[in-house]
Amino acid sequence: MSHAATLPAPRRFVLPHRLRAWTRRSPLAAAGVLLLAAFALLAVLAPLIMPYDPVAADAAAVLQAPSQAHWFGTDANGMDVFSRVIFGTLYAFAIALPAVALAILVGVPVGLVTGYLGGWTDEVLMRFFDALRVFPSIILALAVVSAAGASVVNVVLVLGLLDAPVFARLVRSEVLALRSGSLVECAVATGNPVWRILLVHLMPNTLQGTLAQAAVRASWAVRLSTTFAFLGLGIQPPTPEWGAMIRQGAEYMVTGQWWIGVFPGIALILLSLALNMTGDGLADLLDPRRRSAG
Amino acid sequence: MTRVVAELAGLDMRFGEGAGAVHALDKVDLLVHEGEVLGLVGESGSGKSTLGRCLLRLLQPTGGRVALDGDDITDWPERRLRKLRARMSMVFQDPWSALNPRMSIRRLIEEPLKLHTQLGRAARRTEAERLAERVHLAAAQLDRTPAELSGGQLQRVCIARAIATRPSLIVLDEPTSSLDLSVRAGILDLLGELRAETAVSMVFITHDLATLRLIADRVAVLYLGRVLEEGPTEAVMDRPAHPYTQALLSAHLPADPRERPKRIRLEGEIPSPLDRITGCPFQTRCPLVEKQCRIGRPPLLSAGPGQTAACVRLIDGSNRIAA
Amino acid sequence: MSLLEVSDLHTHFVTRDRDDRIRTARALNGVGFTLQKGRILGLVGESGAGKSLTVTSILGLLHPPARVVAGRALFQGRDLLAMSASERSALRGNRIGFVVQSAKASLDPLARVGEQLVRVQRAHARRSRREAMERAEAILAAVSIPDPKRRLAAWPHEFSGGMAQRVVIALALVNEPDLLIADEPTTALDVTVQAQILDLLSAAVRGRGIGAIIVTHDLGVVAQYCDDVAVMFAGSVVEQGPVAEVFPRPMHPYTQALLAATPERLRLGAGLRLGGPPPNLYALPEGCCYRLRCDRSRDVCRSAPPLAQVGDQRAACHFAREPAEAEA
């Protein structure tokens, strides 16, 4: 007797089909990814796209409204806002990506270990994280950055460490879910050392959730880092960073030069939206319970 | 009698403390002999799974002694137990959650070899293929992931892992309960083959006495953390001494309409393990209960060759329930 | 007139796969059986055979993407599948009682047991609270719940598994239905409690002279409690008939294999027929759905099997009339 006919037809990977299926299942994620890709492209190609040097002051073209020559107008130093917004994308990524990477690097191991060990280690660390969360993160971050000195590296460090508990909690809850099945017990019974249980059996099974969360947290990091710059911490003008530009633009809002602050603001909103949509969509796609036909 | 592979002496297991404490195992004595299949049968709350886990030291008992191959392993730390795990293994009820979904079947079967033997890459590969063949898995399935296999096939993978290091003891915790009838038969058949071919001892945990008749040499009946009856399978099945064993056997529904077993109707349900009972744990449901049953813990009395039961009414032979 | 007559019932699951192709799982492929008043039918099969789905299809309890695409289910002469949703729900809980596997999950955790029993009565009949409460007490007593008057005021979480299942049976019976459907009513219970519940269920059905369907995977339950049996495989009833005829002389190879795998008949190492992979509902073979697992399969099995009938026993197999080799 042959079982061949009962096996499902071999699934060939057809990229256009797969993409269309994803788009249908989560149009939000598709839009997010598209927008995110556009921003990434902007960041990479910034030197090629920018019509002007983003930090070249031009005394002859100060506070010009959007025009053919300057699409987004110019600021008080006569710098081209369009070029600065594009270049700012680079800063947004340069801060958000390392910050999230740091948060994952710290948070994931902590979540793995506390979830696996349980007991008082778990209690102490989780209470500590709870305490951290009670503080408004902005105020805590502000305090630390102003104390430690406002450099890009410090901003990245603070954002990364502040966000580590989010990943720790996420991974811990996934580890607890895995523990409720027999995966961990089976690994112990087979004679796995603890490090192998953590790295081979638990971590790969928590990666999906981490990945989805990473995009959402990157959005948070972008917003917070621009907030810092807006408040004058971290990156200082005239560096083309969105937060710093919005701060500068705010001063001119009342006098009618709206373009200085509004364009970087829109860029910020779009990028943070793109990251959020990507994250939500990924969570949707990766969640096996929401997967209808496998 | 043959060599003793595993021994539990006065094993006690409590979860929690104070009023909320659950006494999962209450001074259990049990021997597992070389090459035998010991069936552990019990309903929910009997402590049968806890017992299996104490035997493999996946749990640290709160009292008593666990020994494997003569070594007292009761207080061994996990670091020391790890090497010992080559000599004892476990098969779980739910193969879907026991196997790492991100590993291929090949890696899953090779894992115990990697952890416990000096075999090189190529040798491990060959050995994994031999093991797969031993449990009747097709070679093509080695490169699949668990999600692509059926429950019965996954349970075969678990068995291949369990026998990979040629252990002296395998604990099987309800290995067929989550499987369909026709698949279940194949797994039991495989275990029967292993029993015939190797000297491995197996502890087969189940709630189904009928399955034990097929596979077990000896049976121990657990109820609320105590062994109420123990003996050769045939003897316990055909001449159950303890009233609980009699009731449990009579509750089985034969898949043959011509067979109408006389049923012992038990009142009520298994008491919560939170409630402490002095005397016989079965007193709340036993049709033969008398004053004596509520006083002291009934000792294990001989009920036949190799058969013992913890019922005071054994003394005057009034332990049979008239159906 | 039969109490329930199901014929040619087809239920499909239509979904899209990862490559956006439409996939149709043919979960039920022409299920048919009849139930007479005063009898208990056992609907038996392995996981994925479609036994629970048959019940939920008939009762109109399907959720998308599952959909009944064809079939009839005549209950007292009226087609349940052609009715409007409101007509059907007027029957459910009233003329048709339903008992599910997990009793705890089907009771409202925020209402006292008595209240739930009153609610289900007043949803279908004009009855005073007082009268409904009296009937609730009587039905709790009928399902052997001790001290029913006091238990009316109890919350669902205060009941043990077996007692909660009794309450669910009481809920299904309180409106004196003509048909009782129980989906795996004892699977979640301990063996010693299982017998109590099944005794109660069959006594209730026999005492009222109504019809009942017990969905189960346990052939022991069918053998001991049912009058008729319908054996399902891959969304079809492959064999049906009186238990007293089917169990001693199964005609379909699948029924034979299933019975041979019960602990009573199983002999280890006796070259038993191994269970093959579960049927792939997305690509069922043409002809007999069992032929890929059947050791008697031949070329003729590629065509749809005829319905062979011996007495009241019917089996869909080309070889149903040939004696099974080495059986019994």
Image: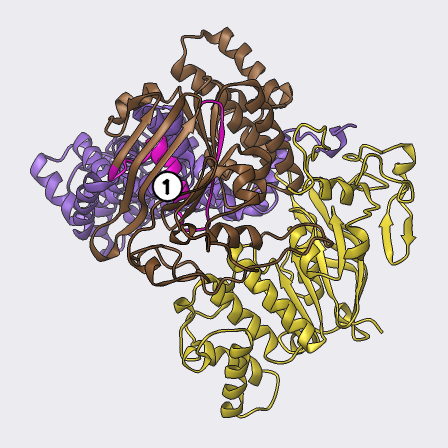
Q: Residue at x 52, y 27 (%)?
A: B159
Q: Colour of chain A?
A: purple
At label 1, the amino acid type is Thr
Q: Colour of chain B?
A: brown
Q: Is residue B28 left or right of residue C87?
A: left
Label 1 crowd (10 A; few <14 / some 14-19 / many >=20): some
The residue stretch that appears in magenta: B34-63
Quarter of the image with the C terminus of chain C in it:
top right
Nearest the camera: C6 or A218? C6
Residue C126: percent from the left, percent from the top? Answer: 59, 91
Nearest the camera: A176 or C186? C186
Nearest the camera: A235 or C92? C92
Q: Secondary structure at mark 1?
A: helix
State whether residue A46 appears in this view.
Answer: no
Residue B278: percent from the left, percent from the top? Answer: 29, 57
Quarter of the image with the N terminus of chain C in it:
bottom right
Residue B51: percent from the left, percent from the top? Answer: 37, 39
Q: Quadrant of residue C96?
A: bottom right
Examine the rendered structure and indicate whether residue C99 appears above or below residue B320: below
User: Would you say residue B54 sits in the magenta stretch?
Assistant: yes
Examine the rendered structure and indicate whether residue B262 appears above or below residue A171: below
Q: Which residue is mark 1?
A: B50
Q: Colour of chain C?
A: yellow
